[in-house]
Image: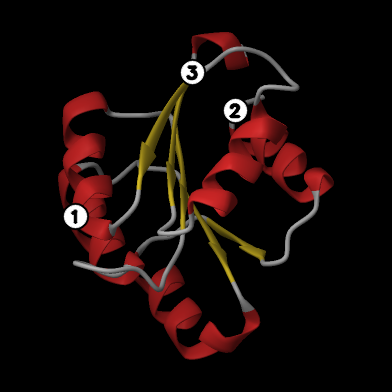
Amino acid sequence: MNINDCKILICDDSILARKQIKDIIVTLGTPTILEASDGQSAIDLYKAEKPNLVFLDIVMPKKDGNIAIEEIMAFDKDAIIIIVSSVGTQSQLKCALEAGATDFIQKPFSKEHIIEALHKYIG
């Protein structure tokens, strides 16, 4: 799949983290980029837009990443969800992977980590 034909959802309560991921993605092309700042918004956007790939933080307001994963996976068992979170969330990371998350990128992340994930899951 060509990245320009993709929809990518970035969900993080940090506007800076969302901007950093978005800035890396647009170096590869011009996909549709959706942004959410909490788990509930991520769920709602996923259901409305059905993106090809989700970058999702775990620790967020309203609904955390693990609840968002469970609800997104219940809606679409084939969802590709990449957790982007910090080291302090090891137990939550295990729960995220058990809930259906596809992969994990540790914060602080590098440009290469995001690009590698995009190539791996989008092509």
The quarter of the image holding the N terminus is: top right
Q: Please give the residue where the numbered disc 2 appears in the rendered image.
A: 122
User: Can residue 105 be seen from the camera position used here?
Assistant: yes
When the figure is inspected, residue 33 is found, relative to residue 35, above or below; the finding is above
Quadrant housing residue 49? top left
Question: Which residue is at a point 48% across and 58% down the rendered structure image?
Answer: 14
Q: Earlier in the sequence, mark 3 or mark 2?
A: 3
The correct choice, above or below, for 63 with respect to 49 in the image is below
Which residue is under mark 3? 6
Of labels 3 and 1, the one closer to you = 1
Q: Which residue is mark 1?
A: 40
How is the rendered protein coloured? Answer: secondary structure
Q: Earlier in the sequence, mark 1 or mark 2?
A: 1
**Looking at the image, can residue 1 be seen?**
no
Q: Residue at x 32, y 70 (%)?
A: 66
Spatial CA distance of label 1 from label 2 is 25 Å
Considering the numbered disc 3 on the image, is that residue within a helix, a strand or a loop?
Answer: loop
**Amino acid bearing label 3:** Cys
Instruction: Establish if 46 lies above or below 48.
Output: below
Residue 112: percent from the left, percent from the top?
A: 83, 45
Task: Give SS at disc 2.
Answer: loop
Q: Residue at x 57, y 10 (%)?
A: 4
Q: Amino acid at mark 1?
A: Gln
- Mark 2 Cα-neighbour bin, 10 Å: few <14, some 14–19, many ≥20: some
Q: Position of residue 18 (x, y in %)?
A: 53, 46
User: What is the x, y in percent for residue 17?
Assistant: 58, 53
